[in-house]
Amino acid sequence: MKKYSLTLLFCLSIVFFNACAGNLKNVHVETLAKSSVSWDGQALPDYPKDKPEITILRIKIPAGAKLEMHKHPVINAGVMIAGDLTVITEKNETLHLKTGDSIIEVVDKWHYGKNEGNKTAEIIVFYAGVIKQVITIKYDNGASQ
């Protein structure tokens, strides 16, 4: 009986492994962004030494909307999942994003975004900060998020 059970377990393991291996053939991995510089060509800063905290935001910007001037003190990157967005720095450096584009955002540089399209722009942004660190600082009054 024990020999039968071990044989059955072995056969089922082989079947399961082959089924899993077959599914792996359909897996596709695509690198959307990989860089040590932000979209404006500036080197990204070193990671902080404190306890890390990752924040992931889904940001929706209505058609015709313009965000306030702001900056991020942490490294962040995103992927446009809908619509179009234009990012403009205080020195008028400009980046146009469309659905599917990725961005490695500028760090500690004043900028804003505007949606010049006719539908809501939607972007998922990943922030690599540390616990209790703000991720966005608004230009007008120093308020932070």
Image: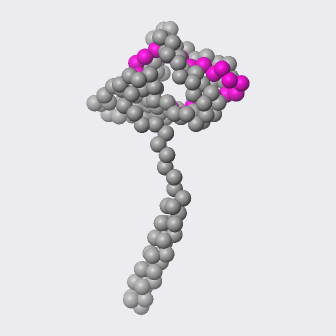
Q: Is the image coloured rainbow, by chain, by secondary structure, or in one colour?
A: one colour
Give the residue furthest to the top: 140
Q: Residue at x 42, y 37 (%)?
A: 34
Horizontal side, residue 111 vs residue 122: left or right: left
Quadrant for the N terminus in the image: bottom left
Q: Position of residue 99 (x, y in %)?
A: 61, 34
The quadrant in which residue 137 appears is: top left
Give the residue furthest to the right: 118
Q: Let me know if residue 115 is in the magenta part.
A: yes
Q: Residue at x 51, y 12 (%)?
A: 92
Q: Is residue 10 visible?
A: yes
Q: Is residue 73 visible?
A: no
Number of numbered discs visible in the structure rendering? 0
Horizontal side, residue 51 vs residue 122: left or right: left
Q: Let me know if residue 58 is in the magenta part.
A: no
Magenta part of the protein: which range? 107-125
Give the residue furthest to the bottom: 1
The quadrant in which residue 113 appears is: top right
Q: Position of residue 139 (x, y in %)?
A: 48, 11
Q: Residue at x 48, y 71 (%)?
A: 18
Q: Residue at x 55, y 14 (%)?
A: 68
132 versus 93 height, above or below: below
79 versus 113 height, above or below: below
Q: Position of residue 123 (x, y in %)?
A: 57, 31
Q: Position of residue 5 (x, y in %)?
A: 43, 85
Q: Nearer the viewer, residue 66 or 49?
A: 66
